[in-house]
Image (cartoon, rainbow, N blue to C red):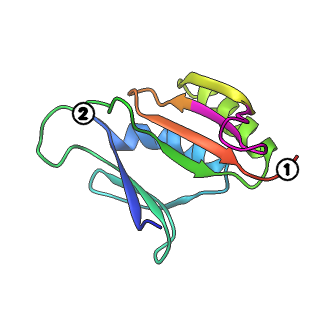
Amino acid sequence: MFSHVTIGSSDPNKAAEFYDGVLGALGIVQFFKIDGVVSYGEATGAKTFIVRPFDGGAHVPGNGGHIAYMAADRAQVDAFHAKALELGGSSEGEPGLRPHYHPNYYGAYVRDPEGNKIQAVCHRKA
């Protein structure tokens, strides 16, 4: 459905310390890091870029939006959330079922150390 998403950061190299661990818990690895741009994913598949704002202004996290990453199972969602907290992120929603979306929706929400909101979600039965 999408090619890539971009997350703003005041220091992408420092942010990579957080995203290496958190996305790594979901099996998503760093694709490349050059000149203050860090990318996760695959060359021809979906990617996440961590970058300084292109306009040169200060990074400001969005309000009302977030990026949700697919997890293979509920254990990955739990690991994602735990790793985020370990690496200086904050919880925006503990791992658990959210049956108001659908009966098997299992997710967790976090904010990275700069305030960007991300999520891991598994749509499979336990």
Front residue of 5/28: it is 5
Tally of numbered discs: 2
Q: What residue is drawn where x is 45% and y is 39%?
A: 66
Q: Please state which of the two labelled residues, at mark 2 or mark 1, is closer to the viewer.
A: 1
Name the amino acid, label 2. His
- The answer to if 77 sits in the magenta stretch is no
Residue under circle 2? Answer: 59
Q: Measured from the top left, where is residue 57 in percent x and y?
A: 13, 36
The image quadrant of residue 96 is top right
Q: Which residues are magenta?
A: 97-109
Q: What residue is drawn where x is 62% and y is 25%?
A: 93
Q: Compared with residue 125, is residue 3 higher up or lower down, i.e. above or below?
A: below
Q: Is residue 8 left or right of residue 42?
A: left
Residue under circle 1? Answer: 125
The image quadrant of residue 28 is bottom right
Q: Determine which of the numbered discs, if any, sits on residue 54 in the image.
A: none
Q: Is residue 4 left or right of residue 106?
A: left
Work out whether mark 2 precedes mark 1 in sequence or the reverse, and give the earlier one.
2
Q: What secondary structure is marked by label 2? A: loop
Query: 10 Å neighbourhood of mark 1: few (<14), some, or many (≥20)?
Result: few
Name the amino acid, label 1. Lys
The image quadrant of residue 64 is top left
Magenta segment, prevailing SS (helix, strand or loop): loop
As measured in the structure, the alpha-carbon distance from the residue carrying label 2 to the one carrying label 1 is 38 Å
Q: Measured from the top left, where is residue 123 in percent x and y?
A: 73, 51
